[in-house]
Structure formats: C-alpha cells, structure tokens
C-alpha cells in the first residue's frame, strides 16, 4: 500500500511542478518524506501493544520496587 501512496504522491507533485529536472527531484524528495512519515506511523501502530506492555512493566517495577 505504501508503494501505491509513493506513486500517487510522486505523480501528483510532478503534475504540479512539470516534467523538469527540478520537478523530478522535488517529486522524489517529497514522496520520500511522505512515505517515511507514513512508514513511521505504521510502525508505531504495529509496535503499540509491545510499547504498552513495556510501559505497564515499568510502572509495576516503579510501584513495587
């Protein structure tokens, strides 16, 4: 799904900037930044149960130690 998002962002930015060397570089950069941000968000959602378990364990350790 992220690949489709990358292509849509790339094509959208390229549509607005035009097919020039600057437009292509700008499209690649913006697409990369958006995909990086969405990838980090997806990883956070994927790791959320483990993060909650770790937080609960630290809370228990501080409460009883």
Image (cartoon, rainbow, N blue to C red):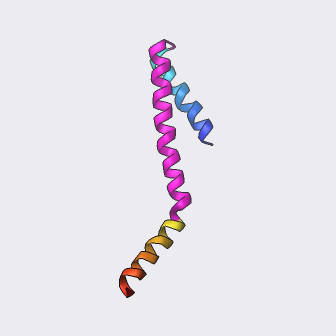
Residue lying at 51% horizontally and 21% vertically, measured from the top left = 14
Magenta span includes 59: no
Residue 38, given in percent of the width and then of the height, sits at 50, 45
Taking the image as shown, residue 26 lies to the left or right of residue 62, namely right
Magenta span includes 34: yes
Number of numbered discs on residues: 0
Q: Which secondary structure type mostly characterizes the magenta part of the structure? A: helix
Residue 58, given in percent of the width and then of the height, sits at 42, 75
Is 43 rendered above or below residue 58?
above
Magenta part of the protein: which range?
A: 19-48
Q: Nearer the viewer, residue 62 or 11?
A: 62
Is 51 rendered above or below residue 25?
below
Quadrant assignment for the C terminus: bottom left
Residue lying at 50% horizontally and 56% vertically, measured from the top left = 44
Q: Residue furthest front?
A: 65
Residue lying at 41% horizontally and 81% vertically, measured from the top left = 61
């Amino acid at each position: 799904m992220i690949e489709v998002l990358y292509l849509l962002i790339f094509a959208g930015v390229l549509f607005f900037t035009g097919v020039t060397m600057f437009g292509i570089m700008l499209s690649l950069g913006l697409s990369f930044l958006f995909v990086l941000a969405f990838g980090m968000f997806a990883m956070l959602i994927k790791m959320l149960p483990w993060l909650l378990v770790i937080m609960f364990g630290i809370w228990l350790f501080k409460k009883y130690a």
